[in-house]
């Protein structure tokens, strides 16, 4: 018997009236996938060390073996991961979309793999495999990961990425709460994507998304001198960031209002460039730093009302 992390182990009892039991393999003790296994049982969520008997068999649900339809159960064939042409060999790194999203969400929250795995109640080895190889986690694993990362399974799967957020139903008993300045600063984080509301050169209002950095009390973004975001310079502008959780119909928004100016001091420009977490997503030559120094910082959060 050989297994992969995330496979389903099923025990079919041979005794009359005894219950069938299944669980997810969350830990391997041998690199070739042979027993024993750490198994998280679906009925108790407890993890135990198991030496499978003759009444146990493996369903390869996580990966799909060569010739097996995606997501369907396949009997244990004794083929190891390294020998399977349809699976990545040990030591290779080729993350799938889910793994990439999990890694991004984990790093965004400053979490290591060990802590994330602990919160998700899964093996750190399995989390590493998920982030580094194409995989299709079970629904239970994905739910636990989403909860550990403070996001949704839809976000981790990439569902609805081309649709605007907020298409879920409103909560039956929503609560709208104003946020204080400290919570607003925490939600702004150190960087991300926000929207600048400004007056375009033709006088019309415009809202433009930009990659931004937070340095002290200042919000800064890079742009090109003759681009639309550059029209913010010399004017009072609004800057907004938000997050919407469609699955739970919850979310928050933060609004900063203040004057925008060009950063011209060479050391300040160099410091911003060296400290920047990302380059501007639109690409191209965008070396003009614009800073917004908020004179007002407010926010709101929608959650379920305590009843």
Image: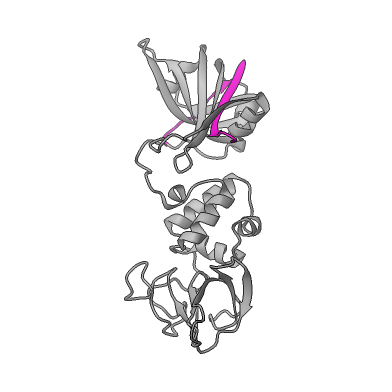
Residue at image location 42% in from the left, 69% down from the top? 63
The residue at the far bottom in this view is 54
11 vs 88: above or below:
below
Q: Residue at x 37, y 10 (%)?
A: 203
Which residues, given as a range, are shown in magenta? Answer: 282-307
Q: Does the stretch in magenta take in 301?
A: yes
In the image, what residue occupies the spot 40% across and 81% down?
A: 75
Q: How is the image coloured?
A: one colour
Look at the image and tell me whether residue 89 can be seen. yes
Question: 19 or 267: nearer the eye?
Answer: 19
**Is residue 301 or residue 278 the one in the foreground?**
301
Specify the quadrant that holds the C terminus.
top right
Report the number of discs: 0
Q: What x and y, as percent, mark residue 77?
A: 41, 84
Query: Residue furthest toward the front?
Result: 17
Q: Is residue 27 visible?
A: no
Which of 175 and 247 lies nearest the eye of the viewer? 175
Left or right: where 232 falls relative to 66: right
Residue 83 location (% of width, % of height)? 44, 81
Picture coordinates of residue 160, whole percent (x, y) = 37, 44
Give the answer, above or below, for where 122 lies relative to 159. Answer: below
- Viewer-side residue, 71 vs 20: 20
- In terms of image quadrants, where is residue 204? top left
Tell me if residue 149 comes above or below residue 231 in the rendering.
below
**Is 123 situated left or right of 151 in this image?**
right
Percent x, y for residue 147? 56, 50
Which residue occupies 47% across, 38% down?
Answer: 249
Does 81 appear in magenta?
A: no
């Amino acid at each position: 018997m050989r297994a992969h992390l995330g496979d389903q182990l099923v025990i079919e009892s041979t005794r009359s009236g005894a219950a069938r039991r299944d669980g997810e393999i969350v830990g391997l003790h041998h690199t070739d996938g042979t027993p024993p296994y750490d198994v998280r049982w679906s009925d108790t969520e407890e993890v135990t060390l198991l030496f499978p008997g003759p009444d146990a068999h493996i369903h390869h649900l996580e990966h799909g073996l060569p010739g097996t339809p995606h997501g369907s159960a396949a009997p244990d064939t004794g083929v190891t991961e390294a020998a399977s042409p349809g699976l990545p060999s040990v030591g290779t790194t080729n993350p799938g979309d889910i793994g990439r999203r999990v890694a991004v969400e984990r790093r965004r929250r400053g979490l290591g793999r060990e802590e994330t795995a602990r919160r998700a109640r899964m093996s750190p080895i399995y989390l590493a495999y998920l982030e580094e190889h194409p995989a299709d986690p079970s629904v239970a694993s994905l739910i636990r990961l989403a909860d550990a990362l403070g996001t949704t399974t839809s976000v981790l799967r990439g569902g609805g990425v081309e649709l605007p957020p907020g298409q879920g139903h409103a909560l039956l008993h929503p609560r709208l709460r104003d946020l204080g300045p400290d919570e607003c600063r925490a939600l702004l984080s150190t960087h991300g994507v926000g929207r600048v509301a400004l007056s375009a050169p033709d006088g019309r209002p415009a809202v433009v998304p930009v990659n931004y950095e937070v340095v002290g009390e200042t919000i800064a973004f890079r742009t090109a001198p003759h681009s639309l975001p550059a029209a913010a310079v010399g004017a009072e502008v609004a800057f907004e960031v938000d997050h919407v959780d469609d699955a739970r119909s919850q979310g928050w928004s933060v609004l900063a209002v203040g004057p925008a100016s060009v950063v011209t001091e060479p050391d300040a420009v160099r410091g911003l460039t060296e400290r920047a977490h990302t380059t501007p997503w639109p690409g191209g030559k965008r070396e003009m730093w614009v800073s917004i120094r908020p004179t007002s910082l407010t926010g709101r959060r929608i959650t379920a009302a305590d009843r």
